[in-house]
Structures are given as C-alpha cells and as structure tokens.
Image: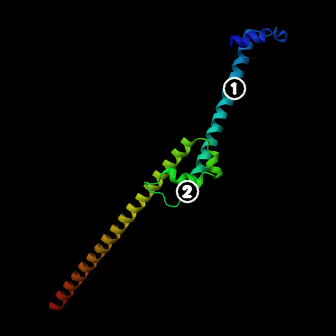
Amino acid sequence: FEKFAEIISTDKRAAALDAGNIKLTFNSLMDRAETKEKERLKEEARKQKRLESNFKLLLKTKLDSLTDQSKWEDVKGSIENDNDYLALSSDSDRLRLFEDYRRQVVADAQAAAAAAAAAAASHHSHHHHKKARKEKKKRKHEKSNSSNTVA
C-alpha cells in the first residue's frame, strides 16, 4: 500500500485526494485483482479437467483389453500421435491418468465377475428353494388326499 500511495501522491492530479480515499481505491483494486486471479485459476483447473477427461476417453476408445499387467510403455505407442494425448503437456499426468484408468478397468472387471458369480449362485439357490417348496406342497397335498380317502 505504501508504494501505491507514494506513486499516487507524486501525480499532481491526485493532490486533492486524502489518504482514506487512496486506501479505499487500493483495497478495491486489490480485491479485483484477487478475484481475477481466482477466476483464472478456476478456468485453468476446468481446462485441465477437460483435457484429462478427453485423455481418459482416448484410453477407453483405443484400448480394448487392459489388465492389471498392462504397462504404460506398451500402450503409449498406440496413442502418442493422438491430439488428446498431445494436449496433455506432462508425461507424469499421462502416466498417472493411465494408471488410474487401468486400476478402474481392473476393479470394474473384478466387480462384474463377482456380481455374475453372486447372481449365478443366487439363481441356483433360488431354484433349489423353489423346488423344495413345491415338493413340500405336493407331500402336504398327498397327505390331505390320503386322509380324505380314509375318512
């Protein structure tokens, strides 16, 4: 602030300004500069997120069969000339996103396999349970029929 006030006071057009008005003007300018910087950082973060999203989509469309054994070095060659690859400037970001994507694909595949196994087991036990109820009902019906014929 002192430097700002010193620069303002050296201008003859500012001779009529008091220190309070100079301070208010300084604070207003600082607030605007901070707001502008926050907006710039938000926009930069949005842009980075968009680039990362596009890169993940590239991985999804170009890579058919990822496993937990898949390596970045093996995959990189097939996508390194794509615009979404080139748009990310950092190799460490590319590697991080690949590793995240690979882990997600493997986790999704494991979850799908577990869900399929659980569904198969549930279907089998449900079928067995249904059959057991049917047999019990049949025995009960036969028993009531036999008691009706005795009486």
- The residue at which mark 1 appears reads as 33
Left or right: residue 139 versus residue 27 is left
Q: Nearer the viewer, residue 21 or 10?
A: 10
Marks 1 and 2 in Cβ contact (< 8 Å): no
On screen, 41 above or below 27? below
Identify the amino acid type marked 1: Ala
On screen, 133 above or below 36? below
Quarter of the image where the N terminus is located? top right
Residue placed furthest toward the left = 150
On screen, 64 above or below 28? below
- The residue at which mark 2 appears reads as 60
Left or right: residue 39 versus residue 11 is left
- Residue 97 lies, in percent from the top left, at 53, 47
- Residue 23 lies, in percent from the top left, at 71, 14
Quarter of the image where the C terminus is located? bottom left
Q: Real-space Cα distance between discs 1 and 2?
A: 41 Å
Left or right: residue 111 versus residue 88 is left
Q: Secondary structure at mark 1?
A: helix
